[in-house]
Image (spheres, rainbow, N blue to C red):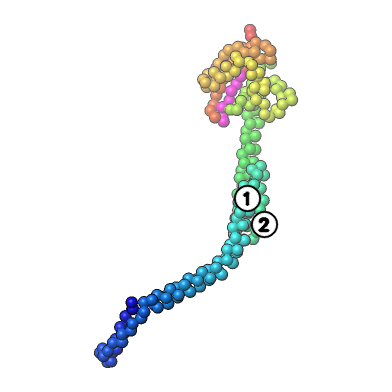
Amino acid sequence: PFYEVAIPLTVGGEIVGVIDLLVSRASADILISSAMNKYVIGALGVLFLLGLPFYFFFHHYVISPLEVLSESIDAMSFKTFELRFPKRSDEIGFLAEAINGLMMKVKNEMQSIDKKSAEYKAGEERWWRSLLRTIVPGDHYVIVVDENNNILYANFDISGAMDAKNIHLLDVVDSQQQSLLRLVGRAFDAPEAVIEGEAVFKGVNMDSKIIHVGEGQNSRTLIYFAPKK
């Protein structure tokens, strides 16, 4: 089989003849295939020569630093909020500095919140102390606990060998005193209602009054013990 190519001959705008060429299809296919192979090989060679240096450049200056930055973020302590990353003067270094700056802002904000919370708790403790010292007789006992049942105030010494800042109600009230714990449970079930009953405290059977007020972080429970009449 052949490819037939007709080329017209014109003189003065008129066709005076035709050149008829016959080209072998097999030869044409071989030439086209050979040319395509050369172009493909050449293109792959160019891509390889350009891509290999680009890969090493991209891996060394972009991928590897980003992996180190990711590992540094994963290893960052939420106690110090310090990002340990080698100082760089490129965009990745600027990104690390921005992250570090953000962490410092978070740290400062959390410290500010903790400070305000501690100041609020100390102020509330002083308020309870002043109020209850005024109205509670000396032979009566009172305990005020927060939403986690940690003691905010008591009109008697409760520290002993314990950390005075983190004393739980059960550190002062024996868990075996089921009658008192039931009264506390009833107070939780009936907020703002005064729950009265009897309970043993400091080895003495006493009259007890318990009231639970507030919700969530603002909830408080007051436990009052009075000698039986």
Residue type beneath disc 2: Lys
Which quadrant of the figure has residue 123? top right
| Quadrant of the frame with the C terminus | top right
In the shown orientation, is residue 126 left or right of residue 9?
A: right
The answer to whether marks 1 and 2 mark residues whose Cβ atoms lie closer than 8 Å is no
Q: Position of residue 175 (x, y in %)?
A: 64, 19
Q: Is residue 220 part of the magenta span, yes or no? A: yes
Residue under label 1: 71
- In the rendered image, the residue lying farthest to the front is 1
Residue 57: percent from left, percent from top: 60, 64
The label number, if any, that marks residue 217 in the structure image: none
Please name whichever residue, 32 or 179, is drawn nearer the observer in this view of the structure.
32
Q: Is residue 42 visible?
A: yes
Q: CA distance from mark 1 to mark 2?
A: 15 Å
Identify the residue shown where x is 63% and y is 38%: 114
Residue 149 image position (x, y, % from top left): 61, 25
Q: Which residues are magenta?
A: 217-223
Residue at the spot x=59%, y=23% of the render? 221
Furthest residue toward bottom: 12
Task: Give the SS element for disc 1.
Answer: helix
Label 2 CA crowd tier, 10 Å (few <14, some 14–19, many 20+): few
Q: In this view, which residue lies farthest toward the top?
A: 229
> Residue 77: x percent and y percent?
65, 44
Type of the residue with mark 1:
Glu
Residue 87 disc label: 2
Who is closer to the viewer here, 161 or 114?
161
Is 180 part of what is drawn in magenta? no
The answer to which quarter of the image holds residue 1 is bottom left
Q: Secondary structure at mark 2?
A: loop
Quadrant of the rendered structure where residue 94 is? bottom right
Residue shown at 31% from the left, 87% from the top: 19
> What residue is rendered at 64% in x and 9% in y?
228
